Image (spheres, helix red, strand yellow):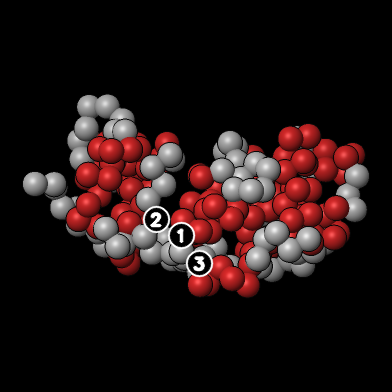
Amino acid sequence: MNKKLEIDLKKLRKLTPSKNIFASLVRSIIYQQLSGKAAAAIERKFFGLFDPKVLNTKGKRRDLLDAKFPKPEQVLKLTDAQFRSAGLSGQKTTYLRDLSLKFIDGTMERKKFPKMTDEEIIEHLTVVKGIGIWTAHMFLIFALNRRDVLPTGDLGIKKGFQKAFNLRTLPNEVKMYKLANPYKGRYTDLTLYLWHILDNNT
């Protein structure tokens, strides 16, 4: 029988649905394979290309959330040099341009997202260059606030399982789903909890 974790929902990060799907996906690409601090710095510079006032703020992320975010058409108008000035690699520049194009040509049917299953959204998003399963899972959790998402490819989740269940080694996907079975239907609560215990060293 699996160990049942005591999850205090009041201590977990509060989720709020995204008001701008395009912005959420741009952020997801920016944050790929970077530390939070490094990604936040790039995010601020990228915002600054369109809304210079954010460069004069005190560095609090809520200032970015209140900033005027560009439309896909505006992102496409940026030159390679402007992308580089924000700290974006050539690869991520390609990803952001492809994302923008797919919003413009209708490939991204965002209005259908509320009625789509998690699996359908993952399939929909991964047609964009640079968006894989991990990015799609983050989008489901933080932008759409889906309640049953377990990103087994996330290193933090693997470490969270190892810590919460006193495992000798990092678990594989099969092991993680077995341990998570009691939370089926609300995997997201478990996901937030596992990140929480790592971040707070509890």
The residue shown at (22%, 52%) is 181
Kindly report the distance in space between the C-alpha atoms of the residues bearing marks 3 and 2.
14 Å
Neighbours of disc 1 within 10 Å: few (<14), some (14-19), many (20+): some
Q: Nearer the viewer, residue 68 or 135?
A: 135
Residue drawn at point x = 27 percent, y = 27 percent? 169
Q: Which is more foreground, mark 2 or mark 1?
A: 1
- The amino acid type, in three-letter code, at marker 3 is Met
Residue 37 shows in this picture:
no
Q: Position of residue 80 (x, y in %)?
A: 88, 40
SS under mark 1? helix
Query: Picture quarter containing residue 161?
Result: top left
Q: Is residue 164 above or below residue 186?
A: above
Corner quadrant of residue 36: top right
Q: Say which amino acid is labelled 2.
A: Val
Residue receiving disc 1: 118
Q: Are marks 2 and 1 in contact (CB under 8 Å)?
A: yes
Q: Are marks 3 and 2 in contact (CB under 8 Å)?
A: no
157 to the left or right of 26: left
The 10 Å Cα crowd at callout 3, few under 14, some 14 to 19, many 20 or more, is: few
Q: CA distance from mark 2 to mark 1?
A: 8 Å
Residue type at mark 1?
A: Asp
The secondary element bearing badge 2 is classed as loop
Asked whether residue 68 is in view, the answer is yes
Kindly identify which numbered label has been placed on residue 149: 2
Q: Position of residue 170 (x, y in %)?
A: 31, 30
Which residue is painted at 59% across and 48% down in the image? Answer: 126
Residue labelled with disc 3: 116
